[in-house]
Amino acid sequence: MTAPRVVYRFTFAKHVEREDVQAAIVLALFGVESLHGRARIRLDAAHLFDASQMTCVVDASNQVGVDLSRLFAGFLLREIGDDSFRVERIEKDGKSKFNGHGMPGGAA
């Protein structure tokens, strides 16, 4: 039985600096590498940061991706704050669930 396909889409407020998001990704990858090893990171830590849209998608359909998502969210909370991004859990069936607050920048 395969794990359900789950991705987390992080969307950032307009005032958030691209470099802050990239730094949080790197720190999260270092942390996940410490937990799972370099080979597992290369195989299972699928993520994509779109700087032009200020979004980042993390594949959380395996334990490496789940841990990456958790560490990434933790670093973001500490560095840019709770109101500067939102997280959306998207399941294989296309359903999405918002975690945390509404849209960054005040939009609903």
Image (spheres, rainbow, N blue to C red):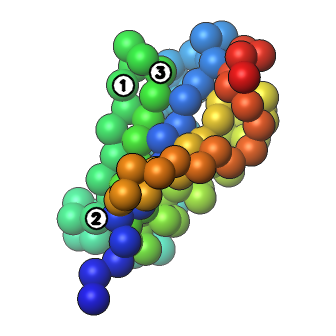
Q: Is residue 37 above or below residue 84?
A: below
Residue 83, by quadrant, is top right
> What numbered label is drawn on residue 85?
none
Residue 39 can be seen, yes or no: yes
Of mark 2 and mark 3, the one earlier in the sequence is 2
Residue occupied by mark 1: 50
Could you give the CA–CA distance between mark 1 and mark 3, rounded to whole angstroms?
Answer: 6 Å
Q: Residue at x 68, y 25 (%)?
A: 103
Pick the front one: 82 or 25:
82
Q: Amino acid at mark 1?
A: Asp
Kind of residue sitting beneath label 2: Asp
Say if mark 1 contacts mark 3, CB within 8 Å.
Answer: yes
Write down the residue under mark 2.
44
On the rendered image, what quadrant is the N terminus found in? Answer: bottom left
Q: Which residue is mark 3?
A: 54
Q: Would residue 58 be found to the left or right of residue 98 on screen? A: left
